[in-house]
Image: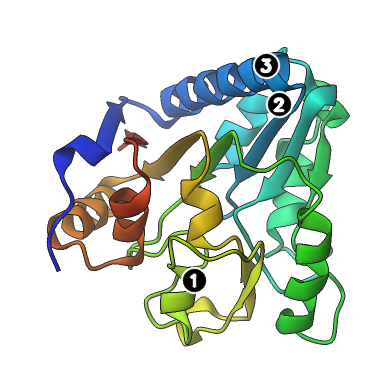
Amino acid sequence: MSGIDAAATDWHEFGTRAEVAEALAQRVSGRLSQAAAERGTGFLAVSGGTTPAAFLRTLSGRTIAWDKVVVTLIDERFVPLTSPRSNAALVRSTLMQGKAAFARFIGLYRPAVNAEAAAVEASSELTRLPWPLDMAVLGMGADGHTASFFPDATELAKLLSPTGDAYVLPVEAESAGEPRLTLPLARIIAAGEIALHIEGADKRSALEAALKTGDRPISAVFRHAGKPVHIYWAP
């Protein structure tokens, strides 16, 4: 598989992780403000994990028309809000505070019998949201996965289809630890802007390898986005 053209990347490098959080929050808040002014709603999807916490807290303090903003998740573990592994819980405790508490948050988890049923229920609600996304903020694992596009996912080709019409898909992958729910690639690449937030030398090396070989799940984002993906990185 061929590598990714350099034109598909837009690097933003910072000396500290606090600087990354500030710069990314500035970009996202600007995009949401523009969307709210132009079409009456700003639509944002954010990622979970450990990396985005500082960014989400910083974004929550930005002065924008939060009552005109809808927030959802890029992906979620099939765990309830009470679980320490819940991405929804992270977003509620970091982003949905202060000024941003006026935004509307729609998560992906539903208390269904399994992830497949939860994906059907979540899709039913997400169809009513103001697609396409104005901003998608991705993370990335050391294995080159983004969203819940794990390299060993059982239906990876379906997840990475750039033309699929699904809103939420279930994910089964041994490396994921538990079943997942995710926006498919087609929903992510349709966003007005896409940002990838990574930190540390190991993540940078993993991304550079994925861009060179073009064979990791994150590579598909750059290949199909049709616009430069904004990379925000600090050591």
Q: What is the CA distance from the residue labelled 1 to the residue labelled 3?
A: 31 Å
Q: In this view, does 37 lie to the left or right of 122?
A: left
Whether residue 63 appears in this view of the structure is yes
Q: Where is residue 30, by image quadrant?
A: top right
- Give the residue type that dot 1 points to: Leu
Q: What is the CA distance from the residue labelled 2 to the residue labelled 3?
A: 21 Å
Report the residue at 77% width, 42% height from top. Answer: 93
Which residue does the numbered mark 2 point to in the structure image?
Answer: 60
- Give the residue type that dot 2 points to: Ser
Give the mark, 2 or 1, whose residue is nearer the N terminus: 2
Query: Could you say which is closer to the camera, residue 178 or residue 149?
Result: 149
Give the mark, 2 or 3, whose residue is nearer the N terminus: 3
Q: In this view, does 10 lie to the left or right of 129?
A: left
Front position among marks 2 and 1: 1
* Secondary structure beneath label 3: helix
Q: Residue 38 carries which label?
A: 3
Neighbour tally class for label 2: few under 14, some 14-19, many 20 plus, Cα within 10 Å: many
1 and 3 marks in contact (CB < 8 Å): no
Which residue does the numbered mark 1 point to in the structure image?
Answer: 159
Q: Is residue 228 left or right of residue 40?
A: left
Q: In this view, does 134 lie to the left or right of 88?
A: left
Residue 53 image position (x, y, % from top left):
60, 41
Q: Residue 193 carries which label?
A: none
Front position among marks 2 and 3: 3
Residue 223 image position (x, y, % from top left):
28, 53
Q: What is the CA distance from the residue labelled 2 to the residue labelled 1?
A: 30 Å
Q: In this view, does 220 lie above or below 175?
A: above
Q: In this view, does 197 lie above or below 169?
A: above
